[in-house]
Image: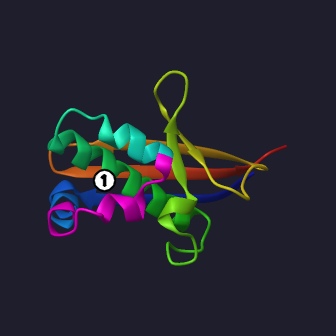
Amino acid sequence: MIIGIGMDIIELERIEGSVKRNSRFPDRILTEKEKEQYAMLANDRRRAEYLAGRFAAKEAFSKACGRGIGAIGFRDVEIIRNENGAPKIRVPGYEQMNLFVSITHSRDYAAAQVLIEEKN
């Protein structure tokens, strides 16, 4: 049974501006494992896409569980790559649920959708 669905979209320009104003902005959003992947990216544009995608996915998760990002911190949600490179979401306390995440980018936006499903 589906417990919740969440979706979010963010402008890459907004994320780029946040990083320019505060170089520690990624530290507020990313977990340690995510920061390792972020640091390995080739250029500022790719890092903005990555950060925006994670930001949107974490917002989408908070909407899917009906609690909002204030009740769930950005670093409480981790988006890692599975063995095929696709995003996989991990959240402590949600191990008993199936969590699905999809992240997409365009020239100007990053968007994400999260589905929370009860395990049978």
* Location of residue 57 with respect to 22 vertically, above or below: above
Looking at the image, residue 76 sits to the left or right of residue 36; the answer is right
Quadrant occupied by the C terminus: top right
Image location (x, y in percent) of residue 72: 57, 70
Toward which corner of the image does residue 20 lie, by quadrant? bottom left
* Location of residue 11 with respect to 106 vertically, above or below: below
Residue reaching furthest to the top? 84
The residue lying at 63 percent from left, 54 percent from top is 91
Looking at the image, residue 92 sits to the left or right of residue 19; the answer is right
Per the image, is 28 magenta? yes
Question: Which segment is the magenta one?
Answer: 19-32
Image location (x, y in percent) of residue 45: 16, 43
Amino acid beneath label 1: Ala
Q: Nearer the viewer, residue 22 or 95?
A: 22
Looking at the image, residue 68 sits to the left or right of residue 94; the answer is left
Per the image, is 62 magenta? no
